[in-house]
Each structure stands twice: as C-alpha cells, then as structure tokens.
C-alpha cells in the first residue's frame, strides 16, 4: 500500500491552498486525518476523485463497515475499539498487492468512525469497472480482512468482530456537484454493506431456529478441582452446537440467539441438555449450569424444581450452581436481584462468571452477592510472571475471604500458573491443565493425570 506519509505529502503538495491553511492552523489537520489510524478522511480524496472523473469518466470505491452490533466498544471501552480499528487499517495495508493494488487509496469515512473507504485505481484491462468484478472484489476484501483480524485479534475480541464491504461506482456528471456524487456513492456502498449484514443475520437466525427445533445441542462437562489436592468438587456444563459448524462454539451460538431474539428458547434447550447429562453426575459433586442474564427471569427456570427433570437426574437444587454469564449488560439490577433471591430460596446457589471482564462485574458482585466467583481467564493467564495480574487476583482473594465467597480460577493451563494460584491461596480452579471438556464425566484419576 502507499506510504501514508508520502500520500499526505502528495495531497498537500497538490493542494497548495490547504497546505498553507494547515501550516497556519495545525488544528485543522486533526480534523482531516484520523488520529488513531493516521489515515486521511474522505474529503482529502476529492482532488484525486475529481481528477479521475475528468480523466476516466468514473471511479469505483469500497466501503468497509465495522459493524456496531459487535459491541466491542460497549464491552471493552473505546480504547480497545480504537485498537481494533487500527488493526483493520493494518489488515488493509497487508492485503495490498493481492486483493488491493498499490495505487488504491485507503481513507476513513470520518474521524473516529467505524468505516473505511478504498478509492480504487482505474481498471488496467477495461475502460469501465464491471459490476460483477467490483462485487467479487468487495467479497474478497471482506473475507481477507476477516482472516487477517482472526489471526491478530484476541479470540474473545474476534468473536465479537464483524465487518462487511459494500461497493459503488461514481459516474462523471458535469451537472451535479462532485461532492454530492461521491457522498451518494458512499451511501449506496454502506447500504449494500448493511444489507449484507441483515441478510447474514437472517440466515443465522434461520439456522439457529433449526438447531433449536431439532434440539441439536450437546453438553460437555469440565471438572472443577480443589487446587491443594486436585480433588474434583464439581463440573461445569458446557453447551455446544452442531460439530464442524460456526455454531459449535457457545459464543457464536448465543450471539446469534441475541441477534435473533431467541435467547430464552436456546437457554431452555441448553438447560434441558445439561440436566439430562447430570444423570451421570458422581455423588457429592456440584453441577454448574450457565444462565444468561436475560433468561434469569424465565419462569421455566424456576419451575425446574417442580418438574421431573431434577428427579430424573437424581438431583436437588442444592446440587446445582447457576452460573451467571455476562454476555450482555444487566439493565435492571433491582428486578434481577429479586429474581436471584427467589432462585436462592428454591435452593440454588449462584456464581458470577468471568469476574474481572465483561459488563459491570463489580456492580454485579455487589448486587447479586454470589456464593461463587469465577476469575476470568484473562487474569489467570501468565499470573506466575505478571505482577499486575498477581496483585489483582490477590485483591480478589482477600475480598472473597472477607465476604465468604468461594473463588474459582478459570483457564489454568500451566503448572506455573497453578503454583502461583496456590501461593495466593485461591482454593478452586478449572482449566486444560486438569482436563479438557468431555461428554462423559471423567474419572478422578483422569483429572489428576492431567498433571
């Protein structure tokens, strides 16, 4: 791709009046170049567009829209979202020479926005850009950027990332103002990207409904151990969609459910499967079952106590820990707390998942007052060599000890992490170091053999 500094110089040298303005008013530059990516914004493309329109009679452009349903900014904050936008800009740079040409120019639609514009260089073999070729290029760029981001983003971020590319062509028309022609083309390209997003969402919803209707969800179990002697104290029920599909991962499964407003239906199916799996639960062990905040108030969850599901599994509510997952924000803590108290009254215990990450975990701890708190794996990863992580987990351990909460470290993968957690005094843990999720309940010997 062009060197950004060279492109800046090219634009400024060819637009002497702007050069003088920027020299006298450097604050104007901050309005024309995005401070996060360093890319120019669309207005700076106008001289090049005007030249190409006069020379060729048309120009084509792409709009890459980082979709806001991903909720990256809402969950992790604007600084993380800025990093993602910077990664997208770098991905566009890396695909230059393959999907994009060196002479193509990349800009941002606006300062600190969530869309990129690619001004395509004229076709080499034809006078006009053919529509089919333009659409094929848009799909290739979209797919390649997704692959690049999958390789660079943290997996937890990537599952929330989404981008779509639309395309449009601008025809020279001396009767119409050039800027209006360009903005009309940008609107068409963005509308095309939005339409592709909606089409994908509709297709995902259709496939999810089929999964729910056919009950094509299975349950794996993942042991939870006491860290001092590695004795198994319980198992987390993990839901999986059909194997070798995008819905096999629970984050994808539930993301599609939220988009299609089918969270409660999916939650009921996953809960049913988990209780069916619990029929083989070894005596004296707990079963941790994930519950979405949106589904906590589901009447069917409360009625589990009075149905045959628990009886068939040989369980009582005291054997079950409802693990609140924070995939979405809790909007009404007062109502949420009332429901949680009712579930406690029925005999269930409550756990907060992913403490230290996600939506308002500290407020959730204060409002829900769970019996169990699970430390997010992002704080456990490398705790043996990262003093900041160690201090954070030590603080959580002190808090848990003071208020009588049982603390579980998630994602323990190395003996060094285990040793650090033992030194801190964390009592319980879960992770690949001990066992991987499996369909049958593993024997205690199998779990201990993980070391």
Image (cartoon, rainbow, N blue to C red):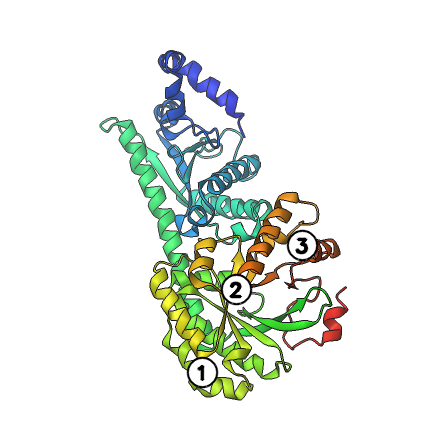
Identify which residue, 39 or 192, lies in the foreground.
Answer: 39
Identify which residue, 197 or 414, lies in the foreground.
Answer: 414
Residue beneath the point at 36% across and 31% down: 58
Q: Nearer the viewer, mark 2 or mark 3?
A: 3
Secondary structure state at the residue bearing disc 1:
helix
Nearer the N terminus, badge 2 or badge 3? 2
Nearer the N terminus, badge 3 or badge 1? 1
Asked if one can make out residue 260 in the rendered structure from this viewpoint, the answer is: yes
Q: Is residue 308 left or right of residue 439?
A: left
Residue identified by numbered label 1: 305
Secondary structure state at the residue bearing disc 3:
helix
Decide: few, some or many residues near mark 3? Use Cα within 10 Å; few <14, some 14-19, many ≥20.
some
Nearer the N terminus, badge 2 or badge 1? 2
Q: Which mark is residue 424?
A: 3
Residue identified by numbered label 2: 250
Residue beneath the point at 59% across and 49% down: 392
Residue beneath the point at 38% across and 47% down: 193
Measure the alpha-carbon separation of dots 2 and 3.
Answer: 31 Å
Figure quadrant of the N terminus: top right
């Amino acid at each position: 791709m062009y060197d950004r500094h060279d492109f800046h110089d090219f634009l400024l040298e060819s637009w002497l009046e702007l050069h003088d303005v920027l020299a006298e008013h450097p604050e104007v530059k901050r309005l024309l170049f995005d401070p996060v990516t360093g890319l120019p914004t669309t207005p700076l493309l106008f001289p090049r567009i005007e030249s190409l329109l006069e020379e060729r009679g048309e120009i084509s452009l792409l709009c890459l829209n980082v979709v806001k349903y991903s909720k990256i900014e809402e969950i992790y904050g604007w600084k993380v979202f800025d990093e993602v936008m910077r990664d997208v800009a770098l991905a566009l740079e890396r695909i230059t020479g393959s999907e994009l040409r060196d002479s193509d120019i990349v800009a941002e639609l606006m300062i600190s926005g969530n869309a990129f514009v690619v001004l395509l260089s004229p076709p080499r073999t034809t006078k006009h850009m053919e529509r089919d070729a333009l659409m094929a290029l848009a799909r290739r760029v979209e797919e390649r950027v997704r692959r690049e981001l999958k390789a660079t983003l943290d997996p937890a971020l990537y599952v929330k990332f989404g981008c779509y590319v639309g395309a449009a062509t601008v025809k020279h028309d001396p009767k119409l103002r050039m800027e209006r022609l360009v903005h009309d083309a940008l609107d068409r390209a963005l509308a095309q990207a939005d339409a592709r997003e909606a089409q994908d969402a509709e297709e995902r919803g259709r496939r999810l409904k089929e999964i729910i209707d056919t009950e094509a969800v299975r349950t794996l179990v993942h042991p939870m151990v006491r860290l001092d002697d590695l004795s198994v104290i319980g198992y987390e029920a993990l839901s999986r969609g059909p194997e070798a599909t995008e819905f096999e991962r629970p984050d994808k499964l539930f993301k599609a459910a939220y988009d299609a407003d089918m969270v409660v239906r999916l939650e009921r199916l996953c809960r049913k499967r988990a209780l069916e799996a619990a029929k083989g639960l070894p005596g004296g062990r707990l079963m941790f079952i994930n519950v979405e905040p949106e589904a906590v108030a589901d009447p069917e969850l409360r009625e589990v106590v009075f149905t045959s599901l628990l009886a068939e599994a040989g369980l009582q509510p005291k054997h079950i820990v409802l693990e609140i997952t924070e995939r979405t924000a809790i909007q009404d803590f007062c109502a949420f707390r009332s429901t949680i108290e009712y579930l406690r009254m029925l005999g269930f215990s409550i756990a907060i998942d992913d403490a230290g990450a996600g939506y308002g975990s500290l407020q959730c701890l204060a409002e829900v007052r769970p019996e169990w708190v699970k430390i997010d794996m992002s704080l456990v990863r490398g705790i043996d060599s990262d003093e900041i992580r160690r201090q954070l987990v030590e603080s959580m351990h002190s808090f848990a000890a003071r208020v009588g909460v049982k603390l579980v470290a998630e994602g323990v993968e190395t003996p060094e992490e285990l040793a650090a957690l033992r030194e801190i005094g964390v009592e319980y843990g879960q992770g690949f170091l001990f066992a991987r999720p499996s369909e049958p309940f593993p024997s205690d010997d199998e779990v201990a053999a993980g070391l």
